[in-house]
Amino acid sequence: MAKGMFEVTCPCCQAALKVDPQTRAVISHKAFEKPRAVEDLAAAVAKLKGEEGRREEVFRKQVEAERMHGQVLQKKFDELFKQAKENPDAAPPVRDIDLE
């Protein structure tokens, strides 16, 4: 570095600037080197393929759960209907809206 020059880091782009104090001018500029987002392209592709399989598995499980949801509701209804027929004099359960 030349006599009297000082180095400053740009707050916006993180570049290294060499400034001459006498002329108050930027003498040299070195751009900030960003680290590579992906070091190994093959590893990144493999990771994306793994995520595709995971998404497919989650989707398949959700479809199965939705298909079973109707059957679960039907069984709950049948059980409650059976209880209502067995004991028709029982008072209906208190709902939250009835308490207001």
Image (cartoon, rainbow, N blue to C red):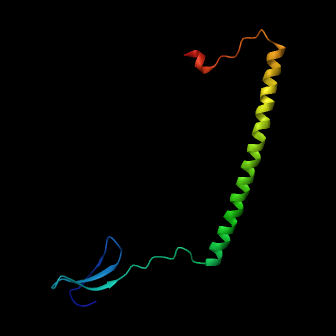
Q: Quadrant of residue 65?
A: top right
Residue 37: x %, y % from top left: 53, 73
The residue at 69%/66% (across/down) is 50
**Does residue 60 appear to the left or right of 20 in the view shown?**
right
The residue at 76%/11% (across/down) is 90
| 28 and 70: which is toward the camera | 70
Residue at the limit of the structure toward the top, as seen here: 89
| 48 and 31: which is toward the camera | 48
Residue 36: x %, y % from top left: 51, 76
Residue at the limit of the structure toward the bottom, as seen here: 2
Q: How many marks?
A: 0
**Does residue 75 appear to the left or right of 27 in the view shown?**
right
| 11 and 46: which is toward the camera | 46
Q: Quadrant of residue 4?
A: bottom left
Locate the C terminus by quadrant: top right
Locate the N terminus by quadrant: bottom left
**Does residue 75 appear to the left or right of 42 in the view shown?**
right
**Does residue 90 appear to the left or right of 86 in the view shown?**
left
Depicted 80 relative to depicted 40: above or below: above
The residue at 71%/53% (across/down) is 59
The residue at 33%/70% (across/down) is 12
Depicted 74 relative to depicted 64: above or below: above
